Image (cartoon, grey):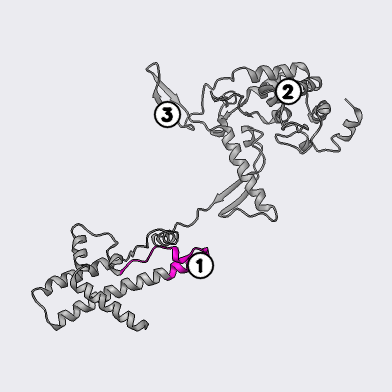
Amino acid sequence: MSGNILENESRGARKPAEILSFKEVGHPIPLEIVADEFEVMRTCLKKPLTPEIATRVCQKSGTHLVKLVSARADGDHACLTVKRPDANQQPAILPSVNAPDIPFAKVLYRPLEIFGRPSRSIIDDIRNPDDQSDTVLTAFAFVFGADVLQAAKDALLEPALPVAKLAAGEFPIIFVPGPDGRDLQITPVAPAAAFMGVKAVINALYDRKKAGGLSRPSRGTFENQSISSKPQNISGAIGGPRRRIVARMPAVQSNWEADLYRYTRGGAFPRWREDAVRDWVLRYADMLEADKTFNNSNTRAALDRMADRLIRAASDFIEETVAEASAVVGESGVDLQSLPRPIDPVVALMRRWWADGTRDKARKTLTGAHFEHRLSRMKGVSAEASE
C-alpha cells in the first residue's frame, strides 16, 4: 500500500460521505490499489469493524425487509431472503440494521468503482463472485482482517434466519389449506427491490425535471421531505430525503371526443348522442299513424314540419361533425379524403339506443314514403341553393 495514495485520498481531501456510502461515490480506481481504498474507508470508521459487527450486518440483510410494512417489526425478525428457483445468481439484498451499524454496512455495501468491471460491493463479491472477486476480497481481508471477511461469508452464505413473529395487527394475514391438511398462514411482503426500483424511477424523473434542455415529465408534481434517522433503521440504503411524486392522470375523453378521435383515424362516423332525437322520431311516427285515420291541411303541414325538422337537425349534425373532423385532421396532418364517407340523415337518426319495440317502429318511419319524399325535396332545395 503506497503512502502517497493515502495522503491524496485522506479524509481531508474527501468527505466521509464521499467514502462511506450505499451508492457509487464517483471515485473509480484500478484494481491494484483497491486495498488503499479499503484503508481510506477504515480510517472513516469511529470504531473497528469486528467479526461480530460483520455478522450482525449480514444476518440483518435480505431481499424482503419486513420493517417496510411495520417499523415496529422485531429487529431479529425483520429480514427475509427469497431466491427465485430459476435464477442462476443470488438476489440483491439490502441491510436492515440499527443506526450505529449503518457506517459498517456502508463499508460492506458500497459499490466499488473499479476500472474494467461493473461497480460491485463486498456483498456482491461474496454472494456472486467473478474472476476479480478473489483479489478484492483478499484486499478487504488485508485491511479489515481475515476473521471479519470469514464472518461476513458465513452470515451471507448460510440460510437466512427465519422470521418467526410479526407485529400484531399491522400485517395482512391470509390463511390457505396447507399440504398437511392444516391451515397455512401467508403474509404478503413486497420485495425491497420493488421499493428501491420505484425510488430510482422517481429520482430519475426528478433529476430529468431539474436538468436543463431535457423534456420535463408531464402531469407530475415532486416533493422533497427530510426525515429523521429513526425511519432509516428500516435500511440505511433507504434513508435520506424522501422524494414523492404526485401523478395527475390525463383528463378522460367524453364520448363525443372519443368518437371524433376514432373517426379522424379511420373509425366509424361519430354517433349523434342527443337523447331528445329519439322522442322526436317516435312522435313523428305517432303523427304518421294518426294521419291514416284523420288528416287535413293542418295535420299534413305539421307532418312536413316535423320531418323537415328531423332532416335539418340531422344534416346540421353531420355538417358540424365534418367541420370539427376537418379541424382535427388539419392539425394532425391526416388526409381528409381518407376518412370514411359521412353518413346520411337516416343513419344519423337511427344510430342510437332504442327501447324494446321502438327500433322497428323508428326504422319503418324513417324509411317510409313521407320521410323519403321530404328528404328528396330538401336535397333538391339544397342543390338549388348551392347553384
Front position in the image: 234 or 286:
286
Residue 370 to residue 242: above or below: below
Mark 2: amino acid: Asp
Note whether residue 275 is visible: no
Mark 1: secondary structure? helix
Mark 2 or 1, nearer chain start: 2
Look at mark 3 in the image and give the residue it sits on.
174
> What residue do we see at 54% from left, 24% from top?
86
Mark 2 or 3, nearer chain start: 2
Mark 3: amino acid: Ile
The image shows residue 221 at horizontal and vertical percentages of 59, 53
Front position in the image: 133 or 231:
133
The image shows residue 261 at horizontal and vertical percentages of 44, 60
| Span colored in magenta | 323-344
Q: Given this view, does label 2 or label 1 mark the residue nearer the observer? A: 1
Front position in the image: 372 or 357:
372
Look at mark 2 in the image and give the residue it sits on.
131
Mark 3: secondary structure? strand
- In three-dimensional space, the C-alpha distance between marks 1 and 3, rounded to whole angstroms, equals 57 Å
> What residue do we see at 62% from left, 17% from top?
158
- In three-dimensional space, the C-alpha distance between marks 2 and 3, rounded to whole angstroms, equals 45 Å
Disc on res. 330:
1
- Tell me if label 2 and label 1 are in contact, CB under 8 Å: no
Which quadrant holds residue 270? Answer: bottom left
Q: Given this view, does label 2 or label 3 mark the residue nearer the observer? A: 2
Left or right? Give the position of 128 relative to 290. right
Q: Tell me the crowding category of disc 2: few under 14, some 14 to 19, or many 20 or more residues within 10 angstroms, Cα based.
A: few
Mark 1 or 3, nearer chain start: 3
> What residue do we see at 75% from left, 16% from top?
147
